[in-house]
Amino acid sequence: MFTIKKVEKPFVLSVIIMVIMAIGQSEAKEQIWEGPLYQSSGGEIELGYVIEPMGWEAGYRGSFLAEDLANRLKHFVIQKPVYLACEQEEWIGIEGKQVGTINIEEPKTPLVLVRLKGEVIMEGREYGYRSVMTEGNLLSVEFISEEWLRKDQELVKLGFHPWGGLTDEKIEQDKNKVQKLSKKALPILLEMKKYSNVTKALQEEVKKVEPRARAVKSFQAHTEGVVHRWLVTMNQKYGFNLKDIERLGNPPPTQREIQEWFISASTKKDFLDKVQSCWKGDLYELLVYGEEPIILGEAFNTWTEDDFKRHQTRAKESIKYFNF
């Protein structure tokens, strides 16, 4: 059903991995969920998509929060589902607006993404099954502003996916086109980084709800990172010497690099040392895929050595199926 290509899409992969994990479940099982929370037409709190698949499953993820958990997290519930949508590899747009003619509706609602870990059960309904998180803990919250979303749309209009990479990689062979695109994309990216900054106020807002949780910028950092790497790579390839490119600093590692470091590491400390030797930024801006997608900073702070080995075993099994 899904095809994962060269373009890195962490939250698409999260959805796929969660679907694979959920098949055949009937008893309570611990899972990690991530996405925006909103009130469904039936009045319940539902987990939405970040990257919304179209077609037969469009608009319905079938993931709900039990009442007690929903009440605890009501502060982060948005008024209506605002998401980035895609049909296979094709960008659709904010709230399903087609991008064929770059007709994208301006976002009116900031996007709030939560990461939850808890017990999930499957409930039968007349129309089939749905999953319900009965008990859970808030791991992190990501606040995506209207300003950041608009800058992301500017990149889409230039020919980038909403999560980073180019929609037409053949452009990379045309030096003149690459130079024009780079000059337009660089100032947009620098602005995006201003809007994605995790402030002390945002950290405090999250900790009022769950003291052990924290505000992060994982989705935004991933999108920015893909564009960042592209700009640096093209600048080096063609020798553009773009003005202000040094303000970006070194790009973050690719998802493929992180997975390879993870798989080859002998211990959790070995993995951490390798990541920190190659990346001086915030570990909460990077993801690793084990039994589920997990933020690196979260993994290093919570995993035991047994957890590391268990997730590493799953990563070794799954890497052959996904082209990160």
Image (tube, grey):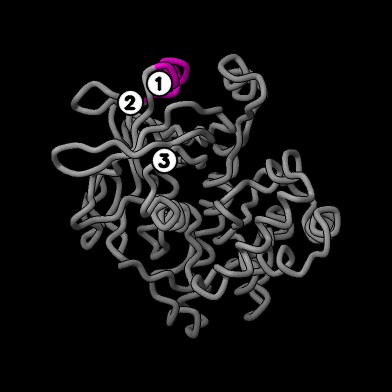
Q: Residues within 10 Å of mark 1 (few under 14, many from 20)?
A: many
Point 23% across, 50% down: residue: 58
Q: Give the residue type at disc 2.
A: Ile
Quick one: label 2 or label 3, which is nearer the N terminus? Answer: 3
List x then y, in percent, for residue 158: 39, 62
Quick one: label 1 or label 3, which is nearer the N terminus? Answer: 3
List x then y, in percent, for residue 240: 64, 74
- Magenta-colored span: 68-77
Q: Is residue 289 above or below residue 111?
A: below
Q: Give the residue type at disc 1.
A: Ala
Residue that badge 1 annotates: 70
Q: Secondary structure at mark 1?
A: helix
In the image, taking residue 299 as reference, residue 177 lies left or right, namely left
Q: Quadrant of the N terminus?
A: bottom left
Residue that badge 2 annotates: 45
Q: Secondary structure at mark 3?
A: loop
Residue that badge 3 annotates: 27
Point 60% across, 62% down: residue: 314
Q: Nearer the viewer, mark 1 or mark 3?
A: 3
Q: Give the residue type at disc 3.
A: Glu
Question: Could you say which is closer to the camera, residue 224 or residue 283?
Answer: 283
In the image, taking residue 83 as reference, residue 135 lies left or right, namely right
Q: Is residue 30 above or below residue 324?
A: above
Give me the C-alpha separation between circle 2 and circle 3: 21 Å
Q: Secondary structure at mark 2?
A: strand
Q: State yes or no: residue 72 in magenta.
A: yes
List x then y, in percent, for residue 10: 50, 56
Confirm or deny contact between disc 2 and disc 1 (CB under 8 A): yes
